[in-house]
């Protein structure tokens, strides 16, 4: 069994419009853009990272905005809802704020004893906010949202799966403990995690597979402390029969990827070296940063990537 997973690291989704995406995360949700770079595998596409002050693992929502991409179709084999943690007593603030900013179709529901406020992102992305009494994580304090209300980071990610069993077994192998179940929802939690400790699985045997597009989660990344821990995790997964990529340098972390049995792409990423490796902490996310292998494309990319006004 693996005991080096510290919870979520980041969640990466697809968007249709960089400017709209940036506005939603920085101005509506009050996160900090901690990095403006490109998709290392497709440098003509941005990779935007939003999170707390420094992009602490467990707080980082990232996007590939792809102009003209078709909308995704919800279904199984994907992350259905990305859930953020907010302080106890702040749900009414968020209901008012989101309504006031024109976010439609807000829903309140109780799951696992927690009231959640569900809402949709610009491309129909599934999000929710859940109040947490004891979440010691510091929020980004640079937005217009007071600290008493601001998002702390991820609370959980909810996977929609046709058949949950093999993925449940994988999560347990990765160090998650099975907790309560409610209707078709099953909760898993990693002990001693970074705060983004929960994965929920919703079993939806009669639902068709999702079609990925704008508003879909592309992959979900779990956090390990360092490269040594990542090697241990990689070895354990390979020994169990998973086909895992080699370690890939993503400049701000090292990553390995594998497909989980339910169809969701899993990544395991290191907390090192972090988003301040190539930018001053006070100016994170401001300049377009390019990895060495794409540095020669700077002139073209600065000309062709759509501008993002802050
Ligand atoms: Zn990733």
Image (spheres, rainbow, N blue to C red):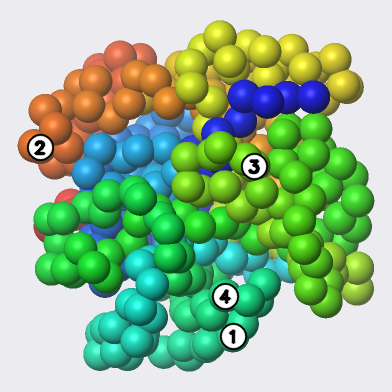
Q: CA distance from mark 1 to mark 4?
A: 8 Å
Q: CA distance from mark 4 to mark 2?
A: 36 Å
Q: CA distance from mark 2 to mark 3?
A: 33 Å
Location of residue 71 by image quarter: bottom right
Q: Earlier in the sequence, mark 2 or mark 3?
A: 3
Q: Which residue is mark 2?
A: 283
Q: Earlier in the sequence, mark 3 or mark 4?
A: 4
Camera-nearest residue between 19 and 106 = 106
Under circle 3, the secondary element is strand
Tell me if label 2 and label 3 are in contact, CB under 8 Å.
no
Tell me if label 3 and label 4 are in contact, CB under 8 Å.
no
Residue at left offset 31%, top offset 40%: 55
Q: Is mark 3 within 8 Å of ligand 1?
A: no
Asked whether residue 98 appears in the rendered view, the answer is no
Left or right: where 300 falls relative to 38 = left
Residue at left offset 83%, top offset 72%: 184
Q: Which residue is mark 1?
A: 109
> Neighbour class for label 2 at 10 Å: few (<14), some, many (≥20)?
few
Counting from the top left corner in percent of width and height, residue 139 is at: 26, 54
Residue at left offset 27%, top offset 70%: 149
Location of residue 210 by image quarter: bottom right
Q: Which residue is mark 3?
A: 190
Q: Which residue is mark 4?
A: 114
> Neighbour class for label 1 at 10 Å: few (<14), some, many (≥20)?
few
Figure quadrant of the N terminus:
top right
Q: Nearer the viewer, mark 2 or mark 1?
A: 1
């Amino acid at each position: 069994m693996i005991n080096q997973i510290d919870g979520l690291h980041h969640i990466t989704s697809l968007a249709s419009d960089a400017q709209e995406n940036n506005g939603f995360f920085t101005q509506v949700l009050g996160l900090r853009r901690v990095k403006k770079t490109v998709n290392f595998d497709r440098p003509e596409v941005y990779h935007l990272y939003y999170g707390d002050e420094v992009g602490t693992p467990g707080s980082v929502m990232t996007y590939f905005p792809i102009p003209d991409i078709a909308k995704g179709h919800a279904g199984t084999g994907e992350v259905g809802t990305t859930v953020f943690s907010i302080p106890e007593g702040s749900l009414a603030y968020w209901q008012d704020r989101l309504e006031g900013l024109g976010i439609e179709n807000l829903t309140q529901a109780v799951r696992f004893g927690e009231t959640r406020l569900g809402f949709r992102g610009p491309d129909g992305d599934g999000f929710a906010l859940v109040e947490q009494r004891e979440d010691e994580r510091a929020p980004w304090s640079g937005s217009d949202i007071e600290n008493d209300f601001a998002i702390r980071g991820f609370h959980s990610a909810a996977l929609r799966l046709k058949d949950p069993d093999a993925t449940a077994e994988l999560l347990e192998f990765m160090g998650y403990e099975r907790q309560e179940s409610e209707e078709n929802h099953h909760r898993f939690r990693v002990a001693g995690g970074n705060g983004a400790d929960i994965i929920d699985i919703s079993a939806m045997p009669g639902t068709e597979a999702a079609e990925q597009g704008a508003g879909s989660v592309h992959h979900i990344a779990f956090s390990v402390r360092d490269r040594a821990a990542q090697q241990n995790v990689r070895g354990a997964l390979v020994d169990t029969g998973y086909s895992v990529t080699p370690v890939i340098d993503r400049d701000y972390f090292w990553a390995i990827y594998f497909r989980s049995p339910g169809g969701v792409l899993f990544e395991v990423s290191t907390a090192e070296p972090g988003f301040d490796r190539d930018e001053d902490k006070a100016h994170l996310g401001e300049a377009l940063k390019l990895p060495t292998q794409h540095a020669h494309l700077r002139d073209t990319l600065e000309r062709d990537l759509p501008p993002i006004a802050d």
